[in-house]
Amino acid sequence: MAYDWSGERTRRLRLMRVATFTLILVGLVVSVPLLIVTA
């Protein structure tokens, strides 16, 4: 029963990239209305 380390690592890297992109997107969506309101 061989475990595919390379496949697991690339999957985790892709997951990290998607999570980072989602966090940035959420941050923009939250901060832009706040900037408009406070400006």
Image (cartoon, grey):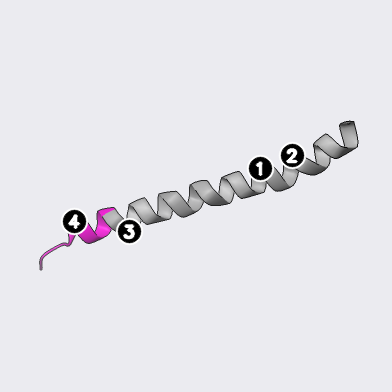
Q: Residue at x 10, y 68 (%)?
A: 1
Residue range of the region highlighted in magenta in the rendering = 1-9
- Label 2 sits on what residue type? Ser
**4 and 3 marks in contact (CB < 8 Å):** no
Between marks 4 and 1 in the image, the one whose residue lies nearer the viewer: 1
Between marks 2 and 3 in the image, the one whose residue lies nearer the viewer: 2
Residue annotated with mark 1: 27
Give the quarter of the image for residue 37. Answer: top right
- Label 1 sits on what residue type? Gly
Residue annotated with mark 3: 11
Earlier residue among tags 2 and 3: 3
Q: Residue at x 74, y 44 (%)?
A: 30
- How crowded pointer 2 is (Cα within 10 Å; few <14, some 14-19, many 20+) is rated as few
Viewer-proximal residue, 26 or 4? 26
Residue annotated with mark 4: 5
Label 4 and label 1: CA atoms lie apart by: 33 Å
Label 4 and label 3: CA atoms lie apart by: 10 Å
Label 1 and label 3: CA atoms lie apart by: 24 Å
- Label 4 sits on what residue type? Trp
* Secondary structure under the numbered disc 1 in the rendered image: helix
